[in-house]
Amino acid sequence: MAKAGDWIPSPLSDETKLVHAGVSPDKETGAILTPIHQSTTFVQESIDKYMGKGYSYSRTTNPTVKVLEAKISSLEGAAGTTCFATGMAATVTVMSAFLEQGDHCVLTNCSYGGTNRVARMQFMRYGIDFSFVDFRDLAAVKAAITPKTKLIFSETPANPTLTLTDLAALSAIAKAAGVLHVCDATFGTPLMLKPIELGCDMSLHSTTKYFDGHNMTVGGCVSCATAELDDRLHFVQNMHGNIMTPHTAFLTLQSCKTMAVRCKQQAANAMAVATFLEGHAKVETVRYPGLASFPQKALADKQHNDGFHGGMLWFEVKGGSAAGRKLMDTTPRPWSLCENLGAVESIITCPSVMTHANMLPEDRLKVGITDGFIRISCGIEDAKDLITALKTSLDAL
């Protein structure tokens, strides 16, 4: 007979995992929340029993952070997860762990600007070669693979254009070539897609975005399909020291409990806003995977779980870049003009000035990021208020 504290035997949903996975009541007090283990070091019983309890120094591992890693592993269907100080720390550690001088990486030509920047301005200086390829064209990706290729780095949906990569097909290409495949799925969240289930070796997120969801913390994570990959990442992280703090892990453990509730509202708002924009006379282009007009609609419907297409969209207005910049400068609250995404607050971002400023201008234009490109991250406000604010600025153009 079941008793209090026992779990139901059936598999748990993502909504339940977001609240409970990895977490247990404190053994001494029964506290329902994981404590913040704000300690640099952990006392050892003896030299012979060093690390007997699993901890020695928080740069190597910390009990609070470990609980968050277990939760994310459960969500991702992963053998293990490593949490980092930032999303970029996660990206840099992946590249550091699996690339060395003389190696080659095939990287999507449309990624978060920081990923593009660190590849060009940091790792290429170390003698590592990168090919920047349109990942919508899998034949081009396959053609870019060489005997020196060690890593394929995808991002779907891509920041900020929302172009999609067929992860199952790309993972099959990577496996046939003996190349590791990591996917940055920050825009998607595990609610939209689980890269490891689609064949990827690693799934990367900036936890700053939807895991946090409240503009409180910065962080990152990488989930791995095998324990060997996870061990390698932990080892390199320990050398670099780019760890997530216990306090950040604690806050993320609390905020991610509401991810499913938040993301459903954000996706509903995104669909409402995108539909409004598509019908406005002054809008030139709008892209959102939920719209029938989305160029990769068939892939979106196949790859995204349960028709969930996320809270991100983008658009351009008639009148070119000057009109787009004017709209961003004049859209009233509840919209906020700033960086970041995935939070409960709705955000307008100008990628050419903010998130993708360090991409080469010609590379930005090649993937469609003009100076008037408007990136939208829908929050959880009332959609009517968001639309009213956008209509105000659009009508004034």
Image (spheres, rainbow, N blue to C red):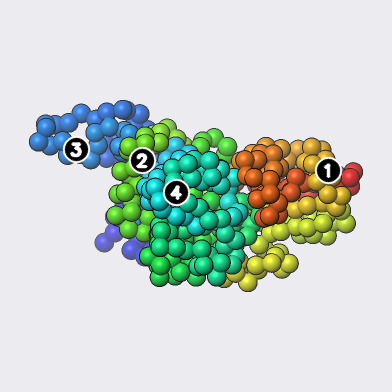
Q: Amino acid at mark 1?
A: Ala
Helix, strand or loop status at disc 2: helix
Task: Please give the residue where the numbered disc 3 appears in the rendered image.
Answer: 51
Q: Which residue occupies the foreground of this view, 228 or 266?
A: 228
- Image quarter hosting the N terminus: bottom left
Q: CA distance from mark 1 to mark 2?
A: 44 Å
| Number of numbered callouts drawn | 4
Q: Are the residues tagged 3 and 1 within 8 Å (C-beta)?
A: no
Helix, strand or loop status at disc 1: helix
Task: Please give the residue where the numbered disc 1 appears in the rendered image.
Answer: 322
Furthest residue toward left:
48
Task: Please give the residue where the numbered disc 2 appears in the rendered image.
Answer: 237
- Disc 3 packing (10 Å; few <14; some 14–19; many ≥20): some
The tag earlier along the polypeptide, 3 or 2, is 3
Helix, strand or loop status at disc 4: loop
Measured along the vertical axis of the image, is residue 362 above or below residue 215? Answer: below
The tag earlier along the polypeptide, 3 or 4, is 3
Task: Please give the residue where the numbered disc 4 appears in the rendered image.
Answer: 128
Residue drawn at x 36%, y 59% as measured from the top left: 225
Residue drawn at x 69%, y 43% as measured from the top left: 352
Q: Amino acid at mark 4?
A: Ile
Helix, strand or loop status at disc 3: loop
Residue drawn at x 51%, y 37% as measured from the top left: 218
Q: Amino acid at mark 2?
A: Gln
Q: Are the residues tagged 2 and 4 within 8 Å (C-beta)?
A: no
